Image (cartoon, grey):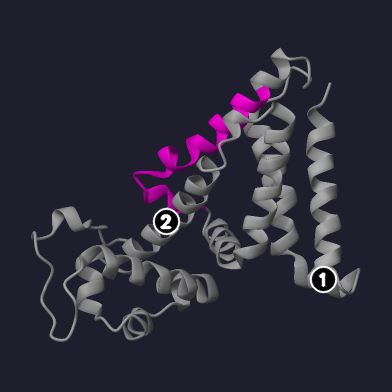
Amino acid sequence: MNESVHSAASQPSQPPKESGRTNDPARTMAGILEVATREFAEKGLSGARIDAIADATRTSKRMIYYYFGNKEGLYVAVLEEAYRRVRAIEAGLHLKDMSPEAGLRQLVEFTFDHHSGNEDYVRLVMNENMARGAYMAQSKHKKELNVPAIAIIQDLYDRGVAQGIFRPGFDAIDIHASISALTFFNVSNQHTFGLIFKDGVAAPDAQRVRKQNIVEMVVRYVKA
């Protein structure tokens, strides 16, 4: 964590040449991030190995350090990409074109499905919270990556209040936190919860019911 995080922009204009590899920086970086996401999600920052990421991407530690500076820099980039991806998909839902209630339902359903289908994302967030957000704090883009999530909810909520559909007095960040808590727990605690309380909690039918229940919890909470 004492090493500085370097960006590709601070490096020479061309990456180091390595025989047998295609000179396609964007593709190379995307491949590194994809593999690093799995490595960090499974093993955390301390357990992840740059050698394993290099082998899986058929590149080298030298190339990885060229693009991301060091292991911590790659980890921060993985966190940023995880948030960037979910925000990009949210933007593509076009919730502004929907009625407030329909848009809120769609957002909760999407969040549930995203978390359920992306356990690596959930593990990354869990790992970073165990580190008390120390590495996310280093990101220069953390606010711009996550402000859109609040803006989407704020738009839906404001329109809903204006139309008399939603009750006034709620905070968009609090609504976002409630959606996240309900959908995140469904993945983060699935194994212990299923073992202790209910077999088959991860079965498709059980998950459909769980998603419907969460949607209703959020929507009925804010409805007038």
Callout 1: helix, strand or loop? Answer: loop
C-alpha separation, residue under disc 1 versus residue under disc 2: 29 Å
Q: Residue at x 72, y 17 (%)?
A: 161
Which segment is the magenta one?
133-157
Residue 69 relative to residue 126: left or right: left
In percent of width and height, residue 129 lies at 56, 56
Task: Determine which residue is flagged by label 1.
Answer: 203
Count of numbered circles on the image: 2
Q: Residues within 10 Å of mark 2 (few under 14, many from 20)?
A: some
Amino acid at circle 2: Glu
Main secondary structure type of the part rendered in magenta: helix
In percent of width and height, residue 145 lies at 44, 43
Most extreme residue toward the front is 97
Amino acid at circle 1: Ala
Q: Residue at x 70, y 44 (%)?
A: 108
Task: Determine which residue is flagged by label 2.
Answer: 81
Image quarter (top left, top right, bottom left or bottom right) of the C terminus: top right
Residue placed most toward the observer, 123 or 114: 114
The vertical placement of 147 against 191, above or below, is above
* Disc number for residue 136: none
Q: Residue at x 42, y 48 (%)?
A: 137
Q: Is residue 57 visible?
A: yes
In percent of width and height, residue 88 lies at 47, 47
Is 25 part of what is drawn in magenta? no
Q: Is residue 135 visible?
A: no
Residue 59 relative to residue 180: left or right: left
Residue 205 relative to residue 156: left or right: right
In percent of width and height, residue 16 lies at 11, 73
